[in-house]
Image: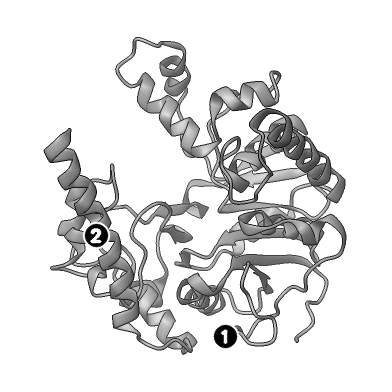
């Protein structure tokens, strides 16, 4: 296995076999627009270290408690990796342009910071949270629960934690330093959470259980506040653009001149794959299976950024190949589950 060299800066990507079709394209897109920038893979659960499709280094399983961290919390291995300062990127993203200015901003920072994407730039959301009679109040409360965790449970877990101190951040795209969080920070939090599961919930802790925190994202929001880590925010053009944006990404123009934003992030929306449902006329069916997602997105000719993903997927020569049947079957199963729920709701309310 290729050794990961120590470096002042590098990019980490957490991936597992189920999203290799995304992460391989992501790596290629980063290297196309940013040649020479170190990229390392954090192996997710089910990753075969001896047999994988990546041409960039893959991190070994670390010693100690780091190695015990499972599922999506493995992204926090970045805090013990070889890069002094780093950018972490979820696998369901694609790079749109050169990010040298972003890297410079990250490297110019001191110690103990996190660079984050600000989801909300205005203070109105705090007024809505405080006003239980506001028409948007309940929607915001639901949103916070889906981004941080079970709010009543969190109050029992730590009465001093304020989930509304700042707007929830997305843990799929952040930058920091290797020393911002220690193994002890994560270990102490884990033992406290494990004890809460045993004493209050009467069940064993699982990395995939969201009874208290919304997995890694909830824990990250919590730890940033509890450790009083300095928060900085990516400049507007260095942020990702959401994959649910109703636009068409011109692949030729982006390859030639780069995109306006740095990345596309398909968080909580249909993701590109070889599936037939990623393009018109079947896209509308796939969009309908995402509850709460705007139906107008289904009228687009393809998933936002699909053609760009397809280009880099081809460059990566993904070993799964263009398996239309396998990926279409997954989407079809999702659509059928949605239709069953819809029929039950229509018949029985």
Locate residue 272, reporting x and y percent: 35, 69
Circle number at residue 220: none
Direction from residue 204 to residue 96 in the image, left or right: left
- The residue labelled by disc 2 is 335
**Residue in front for this viewpoint, 108 or 39:** 39
Quadrant where the N terminus sits is bottom right
SS of the residue under disc 1: loop
- Number of the front mark, 2 or 1: 2
Q: Earlier in the sequence, mark 2 or mark 1?
A: 1
**Rendered image quadrant of residue 307:** bottom left
Q: CA distance from mark 2 to mark 1?
A: 30 Å
Callout count = 2
Disc assigned to residue 53: 1
Percent position (x, y) of residue 69? 73, 56
Q: Is residue 175 above or below residue 17?
A: above
Residue 44, x across and y down, in percent: 63, 67
User: Does residue 319 appear in the picture of this structure?
Assistant: yes
Crowd class of label 1 (few under 14; some 14 to 19; many from 20; radius 10 Å) = some
**Point 44% across, 25% down: residue:** 141
The residue that appears at 76% across and 42% down in the rendered structure is: 190
Tell me if residue 246 comes above or below residue 99 in the rendering: above
């Amino acid at each position: 296995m290729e050794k990961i060299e120590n470096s002042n800066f590098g990019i980490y990507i957490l991936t597992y076999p189920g999203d290799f079709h995304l992460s391989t394209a992501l790596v290629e897109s980063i290297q196309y627009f940013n040649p020479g920038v170190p990229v390392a893979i954090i192996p997710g659960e089910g990753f075969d270290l001896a047999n994988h499709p990546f041409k960039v280094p893959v991190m070994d399983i670390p010693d100690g408690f780091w190695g015990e961290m499972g599922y999506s919390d493995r992204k926090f291995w970045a805090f013990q990796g070889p890069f002094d300062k780093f950018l972490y990127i979820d696998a369901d993203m694609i790079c749109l342009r050169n990010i040298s200015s972003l890297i410079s901003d990250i490297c110019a920072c001191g110690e103990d910071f996190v660079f984050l994407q600000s989801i909300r730039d205005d203070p109105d959301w705090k007024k809505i949270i405080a006003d239980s009679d506001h028409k948007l109040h309940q929607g915001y409360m639901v949103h916070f629960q889906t981004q941080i965790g079970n709010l009543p449970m969190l109050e029992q877990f730590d009465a001093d934690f304020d989930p509304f101190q700042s707007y929830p951040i997305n843990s799929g795209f952040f930058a920091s330093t290797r020393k911002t969080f220690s193994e002890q920070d994560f270990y102490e939090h884990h033992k406290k959470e494990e004890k809460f599961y045993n004493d209050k919930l009467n069940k064993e802790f699982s990395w995939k259980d969201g009874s208290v925190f919304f997995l890694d994202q909830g824990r990250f929001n919590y730890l940033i506040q509890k450790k009083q880590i300095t928060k900085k925010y990516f400049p507007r053009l260095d942020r990702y653009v959401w994959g649910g944006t109703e636009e068409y990404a011109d692949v030729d123009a982006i390859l030639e001149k780069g995109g306006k934003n740095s990345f596309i992030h398909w968080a909580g929306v249909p993701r590109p794959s070889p599936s037939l449902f990623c393009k018109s006329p079947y896209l509308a069916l796939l969009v309908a299976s995402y509850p709460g997602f705007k139906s107008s997105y289904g009228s687009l000719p393809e998933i936002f950024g699909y053609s760009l993903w397809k280009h880099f997927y081809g460059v990566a020569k993904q070993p799964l190949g263009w398996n239309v049947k396998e990926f279409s079957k997954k989407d079809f199963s999702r659509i059928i589950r949605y239709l069953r729920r819809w029929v039950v709701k229509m018949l029985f309310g």
